[in-house]
Amino acid sequence: MLCDFIAPLERYFGFDVGASILNQHEKNGAKVYIGVNLFNLKYEGDSQGRVTKVVLENGYEIPADLVVVGAGNIPNIQLAKDAGLEMDRNGGVKTNPFLQSSDPNIFAAGDIASFPSWYSGDNLRIEHWIVAQDQGTYAAFNMLGKMVPYGNVPFFWTNHYQKGMQYVGHAMDWDDILIDGIPRNNQFVAIYSKNNKILAACGQGRSKDLLTLFEGMQTNVLPPFSQLKSGEITLDDINKIVRMNKGGSVCRKANCCQKKTIVQ
């Protein structure tokens, strides 16, 4: 595996969590090349067009019979531009909380939608199938005149070598991280903060704590990050706050009966 940072996914989770992912790869026999310029790779093949090696920028050759390129994607917004819709700086179609574009008769959902997050105060564009599926239902509700604002806190999960990892919230950048536990032991929670506000968390083997933080974000009862970092408030304290908060343990599934219509 070739990685452009010092640790896999460091850009999204920070060095400590990225290092734990690197450790999992290496423990399971994967060879990881770190700090590679992924924009300057060469591929060499045989006379039948099959790849035989990957050549790094420094000339180092890696034998290969299959190359999988994880390059991400750029949303195709040409149709939206041609329609005169307002675009956002993060490359998406700007929407209001009801997923309406600048033309109220045109809705956007999923990877292409840049929607306002009530929790972070920023416009977000998230490339994940759960968000796309969830937003699609809200857009459909609102096309029918229900006018239900989309406000779900994002979450996702993944597995590395049978070790699950969960992520709640959304933080493309942060100014502080609190890690509770030991990432290399697959038992930890990492909490990401900006301007003393908890924006996101990821973890392994700590599903209860991740669920607590998720519910705390959904119900907007999380304390300032500084109180958690100092130990003034613990994750157990937050769990109690969530339980005491009215509606803190109700069903949060999309499309369920908890959706309420806003009267305009």
Image: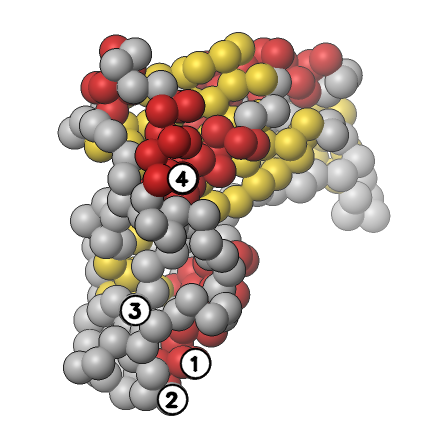
Judging by the rendered image, the residue that carries numbered circle 4 is: 243
Residue at mark 4 to residue at mark 2: CA–CA distance: 34 Å
Q: Residues within 10 Å of mark 4 (few under 14, many from 20)?
A: some
- Where does residue 169 sit, x and y in percent of width and height? 38, 42
**Residue 241 on image: x %, y %:** 33, 34
Q: Tell whether label 1 touches label 2 (CB within 8 Å).
A: yes
The residue that mark 3 highlights is 149
Residue 141, position as x, y percentages in the image: 40, 80
Compared to residue 29, the image places residue 164 above or below, namely below
For residue 45, side relative to residue 1 (left or right): right
| Residue linked to disc 1 | 140
Q: Nearer the viewer, residue 253 or 191?
A: 253
Q: Calculate the distance from the C-alpha at mark 2 to the C-alpha at mark 3.
A: 13 Å
C-beta proximity under 8 Å, tags 2 and 3: no
Inspect the image, locate mark 3, and give the three-letter code of the amino acid beneath it.
Pro
C-alpha distance separating marks 4 and 3:
25 Å
Its colouring scheme is secondary structure
Q: Secondary structure at mark 1?
A: helix
Mark 4 or 2, nearer chain start: 2
Left/right of residue 166 with respect to residue 190 in the rendered view: right
Callout in the foreground (4, 3): 4
> Can you give x and y, in whole percent of width and height, for residue 180 in the image?
44, 15
Q: Which numbered disc covers residue 144?
A: 2
* Amino acid under disc 1: Ala
Secondary structure category for the residue under label 4 = helix
Look at the numbered discs 3 and 1 and tell me whether their residues touch, using CB distance below 8 Å: no
Q: Mark 2 vs mark 3: which is more N-terminal?
A: 2
- Residue at horizontal 54 percent and vertical 35 percent from the top: 166
Assign a secondary structure to mark 2.
loop
| Tag 4 near tag 1, CB within 8 Å | no
